[in-house]
Image (tube, grey):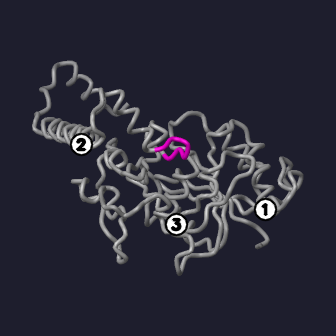
């Protein structure tokens, strides 16, 4: 094993609660610690494929530990979508992610022989469980990777990348059977086939924000939207796709899951049309004429006070 394992702390989206109460103690506890090389990046799901954050992740050749505000399953496959491939590691003191079910592609030729441990920052509201888990992984004691920083602690490597909230499907190739239902169903041109005829999210940003219809239509439950409110769609390994479809059928009086997914897609299209119509209307509407008060404010602004 190398002298240190890269630890990637993926920050929460801005405005998603006071996550700094956990992130900052973690950064303080892990900075300069034996066996740890700390990197801080923006929200994992929002990283641009060509940005410095994704570039950093792809530049790491060996094992890594990723702390993200996502289910470990979805975090692992978001990394895979960015070209960061490996074998998912099991977390002993944190919730397991489908134990005993490694992705079907991990032994494929050309893939790096390395382990990627993904930990969900939503599992605990304090730093200690994560520090202890990292200590276990790097083979150190909690005292070695503890709260007291050495005097000459190296600062973490912080990626200052401007991001925006993204919405795109993430494919779990441990479940995917390449049935191509998503390719045939999606009308937005999101999906395509790679050189080995495997389904891929070819144009991820063509996906319509808020529409998870392909996740509902997937027979294997292999498609995730990590920021969806429903755990089954967001990547919770304990919420099966079949259970999601059954619950939806009960909720909507026995409607067929295919009809439900099509309805969700239609709602996304209607919302897109509404936004475009509203935007066109706003651009076509001339500004209202200024009244006396508006003119007075403009005159005051022009004064050299």
Mark 1 nearby-residue class (10 Å; few <14, some 14–19, many ≥20): many
| Chief SS of the magenta region | loop
- Is residue 236 one of those drawn in magenta? yes
Q: Residue at x 77, y 73 (%)?
A: 1
Q: Earlier in the sequence, mark 1 or mark 3?
A: 3
Instruction: Give me the disc on residue 138.
Output: 1
Q: Residue at x 66, y 64 (%)?
A: 64
In the rendered image, which quarter is residue 304 located in?
top left
In the rendered image, which quarter is residue 203 located in?
bottom left
In this view, the residue farthest toward the bottom is: 110
Q: In this view, does 253 lie to the left or right of 287?
A: right
Camera-nearest label, 1 or 3: 3
Residue 95: percent from left, percent from top: 66, 45
Q: Earlier in the sequence, mark 1 or mark 2?
A: 1
Instruction: Give me the disc on residue 104.
Output: 3
Residue 294: percent from left, percent from top: 22, 23
Give yes or no for contact between labels 1 and 2 (Cβ–Cβ under 8 Å).
no
Q: Give the Cα distance between marks 2 and 3.
A: 30 Å
Mark 2 nearby-residue class (10 Å; few <14, some 14–19, many ≥20): some
């Amino acid at each position: 094993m190398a002298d240190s394992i890269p630890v990637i702390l993926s920050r929460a989206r801005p405005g998603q609660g006071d996550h700094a109460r956990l992130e900052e103690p973690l950064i303080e506890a892990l900075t300069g610690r034996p066996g740890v090389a700390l990197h801080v990046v923006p929200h994992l799901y929002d990283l641009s494929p060509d940005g410095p954050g994704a570039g950093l992740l792809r530049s790491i050749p060996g094992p890594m530990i990723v702390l993200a505000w996502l289910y470990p399953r979805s975090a692992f496959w978001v990394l895979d979508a960015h070209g960061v491939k490996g074998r998912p590691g099991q977390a002993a003191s944190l919730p397991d992610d489908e134990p005993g079910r490694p992705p079907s592609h991990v032994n494929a030729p050309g893939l790096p022989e390395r382990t990627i441990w993904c930990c969900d920052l939503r599992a605990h509201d304090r730093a200690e469980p994560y520090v202890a888990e990292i200590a276990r992984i790097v083979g150190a004691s909690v005292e070695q990777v503890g709260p007291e920083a050495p005097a000459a602690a190296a600062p973490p490597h912080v990626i200052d990348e401007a991001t925006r909230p993204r919405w795109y499907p993430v494919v779990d190739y441990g479940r995917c059977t390449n049935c191509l239902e998503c390719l045939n169903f999606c009308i937005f041109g999101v999906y395509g086939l790679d050189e080995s005829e495997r389904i891929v999210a070819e144009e991820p940003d063509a996906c319509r924000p808020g529409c998870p219809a392909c996740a509902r239509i997937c027979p294997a439950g292999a498609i995730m939207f990590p920021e969806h409110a429903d755990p089954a769609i967001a990547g919770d390994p304990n919420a099966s796709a079949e259970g999601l479809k059954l619950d939806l059928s009960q909720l909507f009086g026995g409607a067929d899951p295919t009809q439900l997914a099509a309805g969700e897609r239609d709602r996304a299209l209607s919302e897109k049309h509404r936004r475009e119509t509203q935007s066109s209307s706003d651009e076509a509407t001339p500004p209202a004429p200024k009244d006396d008060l508006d003119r007075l404010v403009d005159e005051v602004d022009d004064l050299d006070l």
